Image: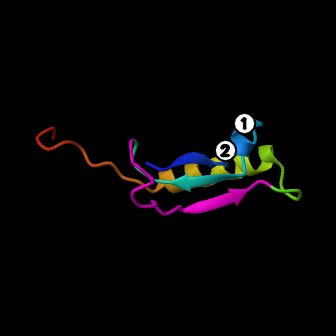
Amino acid sequence: MYKIMTVSTPGSRSRGEVLSYVVTNQPSGWNSYEKKWPFVAEFPVCVGYCDADQRRRAEEYRDYMNKSIVVPPAIGTE
């Protein structure tokens, strides 16, 4: 499943700011310091694109990507 994560620096985090929203299928608990997991899409927050717009775009893209995922039934349930 794809999810939305935020990217920020220590300074922007202390101010409560988000630098960008990313759509990724990175597993929970992945240690990003070992090896960077690739982003599917990134939506940077800047002067031209406000935080709310970029968050909405990331949510729409996440929903679009999750639509095509087919979860097969567990073995032996059919």
**Range of magenta residues:** 29-45
Magenta span has 31?
yes
Residue linked to disc 2:
10
The one nearer the camera, 2 or 5, is 5
The one nearer the camera, 41 or 47, is 47
**Would you say 13 lies left or right of 70 here?**
right
Q: Residue at x 15, y 41 (%)?
A: 78
Q: Looking at the rendering, which quadrant does residue 34 occupy?
A: bottom left
Where's residue 50, x and y in %?
Answer: 84, 49
> Is 62 situated above or below 14?
below
Where's residue 64, x and y in %?
Answer: 56, 54
Magenta span has 57?
no
Residues at badges 1 and 2 in contact (C-beta under 8 Å)?
A: yes
| SS of the residue under disc 2 | helix
Estimate the spatial distance between the alpha carbons at disc 1 and disc 2, rounded to whole Å: 6 Å
Residue linked to disc 1:
14
